[in-house]
Image (spheres, grey):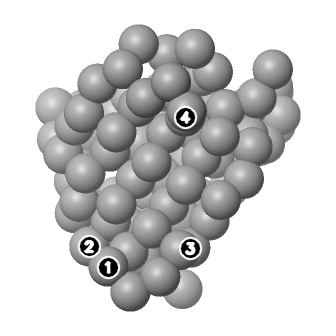
Amino acid sequence: MALHFELVTPARLVRSEDVYMVVVPGAEGEFGVLEGHAPFMSTVRDGAIKVYRTEGATPEEIQVQGGFAEVAATGLTVLAEHVEG
């Protein structure tokens, strides 16, 4: 089972891949998303998105600034205002 994760900025598609889990720095606190998560939307605060490629893996951190996250049947999409790197 895999979660489809996309990270985009207004300028480009940064990531589009299947992963195990993603932890997003939401405005109300961090939230984790696995495959099959209930649909919802949240604003994203400045911080690190943690991408877990497999269960139990060490997460890869991607620094983002602002934006929105949407969880849908198709997966997780994060539209960030800016992505470091």
Question: How busy is the neighbourhood of tag 2: few (under 14 within 10 Å), some, or many (20 plus)?
Answer: some
- Choose mark 4 or mark 2, whichever is in front: 4
Dot 1 amino acid type? Pro
Compute the Cα span from label 4 to label 2. 20 Å
x 32%, y 45%: residue: 69
**In the displayed structure image, the side of residue 24 where residue 13 appears, left or right:** right
**In the displayed structure image, the side of residue 52 where residue 26 appears, left or right:** left
- To which quarter of the image does residue 56 belong? top right
Going from N to C along the chain, the mark reached first, 2 or 1, is: 1
Q: In this view, does 27 lie above or below 7?
A: above
Question: How busy is the neighbourhood of tag 3: few (under 14 within 10 Å), some, or many (20 plus)?
Answer: few
Residue at the disc numbered 4: 75
Residue at the disc numbered 2: 81
- Mark 4 in CB contact with mark 1 (< 8 angstroms): no
- Mark 2 in CB contact with mark 1 (< 8 angstroms): yes
The x and y percentages for residue 58 are: 77, 43
x 41%, y 13%: residue: 38
Compute the Cα span from label 4 to label 3. 16 Å
**In the displayed structure image, the side of residue 58 where residue 28 appears, left or right:** left
Compute the Cα span from label 1 to label 3. 10 Å
Going from N to C along the chain, the mark reached first, 4 or 3, is: 3
Compute the Cα span from label 2 to label 3. 12 Å
Compute the Cα span from label 2 to label 1. 7 Å
Which of these two is toward me, 22 or 47?
Answer: 22
Residue at the disc numbered 1: 10
Going from N to C along the chain, the mark reached first, 4 or 1, is: 1
Going from N to C along the chain, the mark reached first, 4 or 2, is: 4
Q: Is residue 52 above or below residue 46?
A: above
- Choose mark 2 or mark 1, whichever is in front: 1
Compute the Cα span from label 4 to label 1. 19 Å
Residue at the disc numbered 3: 14
x 62%, y 65%: residue: 15
